Image: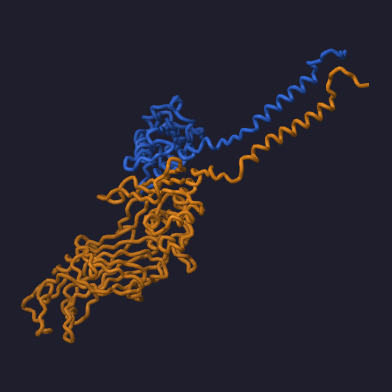
Chain colours: A blue, B orange
Amino acid sequence: MVKDGAQLYTMEGIAAGLIMLLTTYLVLGSTSVYTPGDTHLTDMQLEQVGSDILKIMDTPANHTSKSSLRILIDNTDTQGFNDSFSGTYFNSPNTRAAVTAFGSSRIRIKTTIWFRNQTSNAVEKYTLYSSPDDIANPAAEGPGVRVTRLVHLDARPPGLQALDFEAWESMRDKPQEVLVEVLMWQV
Amino acid sequence: MREDSAQLPVDFLVGFTIFILCLIMVANFVPSLLVGLQRTSGIDYDAVAYRTGVVLTEDPGWPAGNPVMGEFFPGDARPWEQGANESVIRLGLTLTTDSPNILSINKIDKFFNGTFYGNDYRTKLLFSNYQYGYNISLQSLWPLNPDEPILNMSIGEPHPTGYGYIRRYVFIKQNSNATVNLNTTTKKDVVPVQLAYTAMTEEEVDQEFRIRLDGRLLYNRSIATPYKIDLLKESFTIRITNLSFVLNRSDLNPSPVAHNLTNWTYNECATEPHPEDRTFPVSANLTKIIFYPDCKVPDIPFYANRMVVTIDDRMDSVGRQVLEGAVPLSYNPPVYDTIQLDIDPLWPPGTPLFDSTQCLEIGLVFDDRDHCPGQGFPLPHTLIHGSFVYDYFNVTRPDLVPGMLEVSIW
């Protein structure tokens, strides 16, 4: 039964009040314009650099030799990959120090090789190189960037057996394409 | 009957809700109007630097010649690095469109050492008349050649505190070169040809050393673009050394002069005996340079593009001659040991047509005969004859060298 007392809490009043509060919140919140792209320019630069380094590593120096990336994977040279990617290219001692958004010595990488299982055809992976500083380290700045490149192998890398026996068993010993994925982050 | 129970009617609520929703939409729209279309203090310099880096490292520039390496059609404009600065539409450093991150040393030289002005870089690379500040530098990660410092080139001013930046990694491709060492070669076609003693006394000997450029070998499709010898767009150097070894090979040259036979009578020029008639030859005069289109009949007696001829590493005007625009040799210097030809790209129309279907020979004609004016027969002191094929087996092609390109914009 409807009464005519001080009806401060009628359903309609509550609804009206909520609408007004919501309106006020939305109006005040609309004054901020978010551009998510502005916060990732440094990541784009890092991604471009990583992509370039992978491309350079995968290009032979002359038309009779193999690329250094191919040799590193064939030899399962874990430290050699980091020495080449980070040491030779990123931190080249012959280039002058550049004032950049990312200091060359603050970069860490983790390299994963993706391949297909010879039996199930499922995509599997093994870690070629992992930095001692994990990306989950609180000192890491930002989520990191990922660069990839498809590389042709003539056969299963023989050194993989010592590094990751399960991956070596799963990988077919035939010509194949593998995906080299390098995760890069700053500390 | 209107009641006074302080309840909002439903239709009022509906109208109020519609009004509030419209107010929310307008309020959300207003800030985007305030962003502004011209943000003179907010240019994204990182984006400009990135775009500039892409143009330099992934584009060959314009004009770039024919997009297919080794092909030439009459309408193809001369590549920008070979033409005048005014002909440049866009500056790019790669070999071709399908070889990103592989830079041409010739384009690098022209870009960093050419006589471009600041506004040239702004209009042909930054594509804007806005007075951007810029600094573009290229360094090789290790020396291009042994015993040389690393390549380090830059243009522009030092950057201020705030600036846009991009770094790109590239490969630098250098030009090819060939060294013909007459002292070590064992190929028959590069050592002097023996001639019979009797024939030599009566016939004129053609003393010509040829360098064969076969486009069908050089532009072989089995060679990938970054490793091809592209003589249409690249300079090349040919160095012939140890000519003295040839000049003094008595086992190869049966002439009495080469053997310094003292009992042989040379009746000619008896009144003006020449010392070299009786001694081993020590030099040969380079008389002319001939081009053979299609490796056949000689056509052009001299080079029509630009070629530098250096004799015995001499830097004087006789030893070092710059041939440009159909000019013959100014001097016929004696060659004691070395000839070096530094030849500009064979882009038409300066030279006989040379492309992936053509063959071209360069003939170096020597004359070391002792000519007694108006008297007798010329007798060569030695025989310089043979040919050298400029192909992937005989030529030195330096490895690709990695480098780092940095672009700063403010």
Q: Quadrant of the N terminus of chain A?
A: top right
- Residue B191, percent across and down? 22, 67
- Residue A166, percent across and down? 43, 28
Q: Residue furthest bottom?
A: B374
Q: Is residue A152 above or below residue B398?
A: above
Q: Kindly indicate the quadrant of the structure image that contains residue B6.
A: top right
Instruction: Determine the residue positioned at 29% across, 60% down.
Output: B178
Marker count (numbered): 0
Q: Is residue B380 above or below residue A77?
A: below
Between A125 and B126, the one lying in front of the other is B126
Between A139 and B345, the one lying in front of the other is A139
Asked whether the viewer can see residue B91, the reply is: no
Between B46 and B307, the one lying in front of the other is B46
Q: Kindly indicate the quadrant of the structure image that contains residue A151.
A: top left
Q: Kindly indicate the quadrant of the structure image that contains residue A46.
A: top left
Q: Is residue A47 left or right of residue B393?
A: right
- Residue B182, percent across and down? 21, 63
Asked whether the viewer can see residue A69, the reply is: yes
Q: Is residue A157 left or right of residue A14?
A: left
Instruction: Determine the residue positioned at 42% across, 39% down.
Output: A100
- Residue B317, percent across and down? 24, 69
Q: Is residue B92 above or below residue B381?
A: above
Q: Quadrant of the C terminus of chain A?
A: top left
Q: Residue furthest right?
A: B1
Q: Residue furthest left?
A: B263
